[in-house]
Structure formats: structure tokens, C-alpha cells
Image: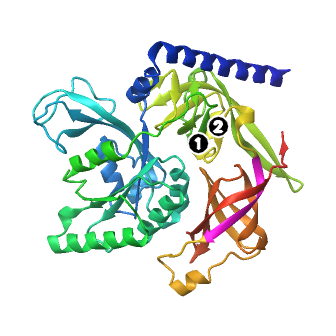
Amino acid sequence: LTLMLHKCIQILSHLIIKIKLSILDLLNGNDYYKIQKFDQQATVNIGVIGHVAHGKSTLVKALSGISTVKFKNELERNITIKLGYANCLIFKCTNLHCTPPSCYQTIVSNSCKRLKCIRCHKKLVSAKHVSLVDCPGHEILMNTMLGGASIMNAAILVIAADEECPQPQTFEHLAAVNLCQLSKLIIVQNKIDLVDNTQALKNYYQIKNLCRSNKLKNYHIIPLSAQKQINMDVLLQLIVEKFTEIPRNIHELPLIFIVRSFDVNKPGIDLKDLNGGVVGGSIVKGVIKLNQYLEIRPGIFFKRKNEILCNFLRIQIKSINVEDKNLSYATAGGLIGIGTNLDPSITKGDKLSGQIMGIGKSLPSIVSKILITYRILKRIIYLSKESVKSLTIKLGEIIMITVNNSTTSGKIYSKKKNRVSIELIKPICCKIGDRVCVSRRISNHWRLIGCGKIIKSNSKLNIV
């Protein structure tokens, strides 16, 4: 009876959302949501990618005013370890004499009152609201970047001018972007204040060769210094003009990719003030609202007598947050935090990272075995061409795969030409046709070696 009641509440809740959306569409000519989403939520997720110490976090801070290096171990080592998030609003001056690119300026999302141009003191108008995903550049954190790529609509590749190009993770991140079919790319040649003209030009032509070898089209290379704020207005203009908003259908059932989860309660908090666990990620499609009932899958899973048991989580949305703003509903676009009624111990320390959230039967199946077709990358920077040609997945080998926002390892138990069957160590939610990024252990590190597509899956799991 309890399960039936939950399902009835879910169906009624979704019907109410659809009715409200339809009424508002009729009353406002469908412009209401565009305005609300633009003001409250970012419309584009931009991944900031590249090799370690090339200035990704510095660039994010220059754009948004927010430092994404927050955790103790990140501050001690001065590197990004977890995915970092920051929102920024880009404005354009209304003065016709304030010409591009200098008319574009960025202001932190939560401090936009009585906006004036810093050059001519005329009024500023909103040009674009974006979310920035700061990806770690260290080689051992490649899987974190691949998981973050699932929520990106576009990417900024940061390359330092004071180092040879390409560096290992520059090449790997660019390959990952191509595998995820992100066609919207801007290349930033950072740290030009540290090199002379000769070195800057040499590095520029190395970047051009890298783009040519990867068959990139319609790309832009911007020399800038994030630290000294040189050429930042050129980058802002390109973000506004090139990174267009991807249209989303608000009438579809909601689907959220979870890439972070955490406990917001401080030690020693009073029991009456205890908050439920929080999950963070991006809405892929649909609309969510306060007090709505959703499911998180695959949820909590464990093994018993060689069987995998899954207990997916039924949650109620208690809060929807974008930075310091509390929303009553949220649509696709931008990064959001969702407060739930879950026990905080379940969400603590990214325990739910890689899972998906939505309405029950609309979610993909939970699978433990998949059959994929794959291909090896034509070029892998740390291997010779002869080694790449002989690089094939072997029977019984353990490989790492990334499907959407989920990363897991699995064992190859069947192989035929370019098809392999994989028994996953932990179950994931996926459907036939989903893209797969394949990583292999080389020199004690997981390296991206290829990509593939799911052509068959086994969803025979015990759901409890």
C-alpha cells in the first residue's frame, strides 16, 4: 500500500507540473521559462579542461570571482581533486560607442545590482549566464574528468604557453571531448605574460598542429593571461557568440545526472536542525520542483551469495539551490544542488556520485553486464604508433568504463573481434546506444584508450 501511495503521488505531482507549465505557456507565449531560467539558472555548462597546473582554476576564478579549490587536501597540494563549480553572468554594455570585445564584462552571479560599465559607466544588460565545471588535470584523476564531461554542453581547453604542447592530459582531455561529441570548443593559450613573443608563437603553432591532428573544425585560439586579466574580454565575447543555449524540452520527464553528493551538517549540530543529504549535478531534461518525489538509481547495492542486490532510493526534494539562491523549481541547464530527505550518511563523501535521479519507470535499467562495440584511439601520446596498433583488449582483463556520469571497472568475460562482454564490479544505469569511454591500466595509471557503444545489456538484478 505504501509503494502504491508513493507511485500515485509521483504521477499526480508530475501531472500538476505539466498542467502548470501548459497554463503558463499559454499565458506567456512560452517566453516565461526562458526569462526565469536565464535569471535564476545558467543556460550552458562549460567544462574547463587541460593539463595539470595550466591555470584552469585561475581562469575560472577570473571569470566568476569564485575559487573552486576549497577542500583541505586541494589547498595543501594546490591542485583540483574534485570537480569544481562556479556560475558567472556575462554582461554587455548598451553604449553603441563601447565596441566589442571591450563591451563584454563578467560579474559574479550574486552581486549584480545597479550594473554600470567599468569603461563608460552606461547600463549593462545580461548577455549570457553560464556554469563552469573545473575539471582536475592530474593523470590519476582522468576518470573524474570523464564523469564531469557528461554534464558539459561546451568546453574551454586551457594550454599553458610556457610548456611544450601537447602535454599528456591536454591530449587526453581533448580526446575525451571528441569522444563525447562536444563540438563547441574554445582553446585558451594561458600564461602569455610569462613568455616572450618567440616562445608564444612557437607554442601557438604547436596548438595549431594539435588541432590539425585531431581534425578540429571551427576552433578559436585565444592568447590570454588569467592572472593579469589580459584578453579576458575576447574570451567573454566568444563564449556569448559561440556557446549558444541548447534547447531542452521542459515537458519531458525529469532526468538528473548526479556528479557530487555531500553532508552539509556541521559536527555537533542539534538534532532538530539536522538537514537531509544533498546531491549536486545537472538536469538533462524536464522540470523538478519542491516537495516532488523522485528515485535515485542504482541506489545502495551489495552482494549476497554471488548475487547483486540493489535498493534504489526514494527521495523527496526539500530544497533546490543555485549558488545562494533558493528556487521553487528548476529546468535543464546549469548546475544545481538538491536538498533531500535522505540520511546525510548516505550522501556523505560523494557516495551517490555517478547515479541518476528521476521518476521511477522512466529511468534506464540497472545493469551488471553489458556488451559493447569499441575502437582504439588512433593516437595515444604516451605510446608509439606500433604500440597503439597492438593495443587490444584481452580476455579476462580488468578495464575501466565511463557511461554518462557513471564510472566503474569490469572484467572481460567474452570477446569477438571488436565486441566485448563486460561483467561490471558495480551496477550502473544505462540504455542501449549509450556511449562508453574505455580506459586501461598502463604504467600503474588508468589511461583513456578508446570508446564504444552499448549494444546489449543484462538487467536481471534483484531489486529490494
Residue 110 sits above or below residue 382 on the image: above
**Secondary structure of the residue carrying numbered label 1:** strand
Q: Is residue 16 left or right of residue 164?
A: right
Check if mark 1's residue and mark 2's residue have beta carbons within 8 Å.
yes
Residue type at mark 2?
A: Met
Q: Amino acid at mark 1?
A: Ile
Label 1 Cα crowd, 10 Å radius (few <14 / some 14-19 / many 20+): many
Q: How many marks?
A: 2
Find residue 460 and report its horizontal and vertical position in percent: 85, 49
Residue 102 seen anywhere in this rendered image of the structure: yes
Q: Is residue 301 above or below residue 255?
A: below
Query: What's the distance in space between the residues labelled 1 and 2, CA to CA?
Result: 7 Å
Depicted 161 relative to depicted 122: above or below: below
Q: Quadrant of residue 325?
A: top left
Residue 368 magenta-highlighted: yes
**Which quadrant of the rendered structure holds the N terminus?**
top right
Q: Which residue is mark 2?
A: 357
Residue lying at 62% horizontally and 57% vertically, measured from the top left: 402
User: Which of disc 2 and disc 1 is earlier in sequence?
Assistant: 1
How busy is the neighbourhood of tag 2: few (under 14 within 10 Å), some, or many (20 plus)?
A: many
- Judged by its main secondary structure, the magenta piece is strand
Was residue 424 drawn as part of the magenta stretch in this picture?
no
User: Residue sitting at 68 percent across and 75 percent down?
Assistant: 393
**Of 404 and 433, which appears nearest the observer?**
433
Which one is nearer the viewer's eye here, 17 or 137? 17
Given residues 129 and 147, the one toward you in this image is 129
Q: Quadrant of the C terminus?
A: top right
| Camera sees residue 62 | no
Question: Which residue is rendered at x = 70% and y = 57% of the image?
Answer: 454
Write down the residue under mark 1: 258
Who is closer to the viewer here, 451 or 87? 451
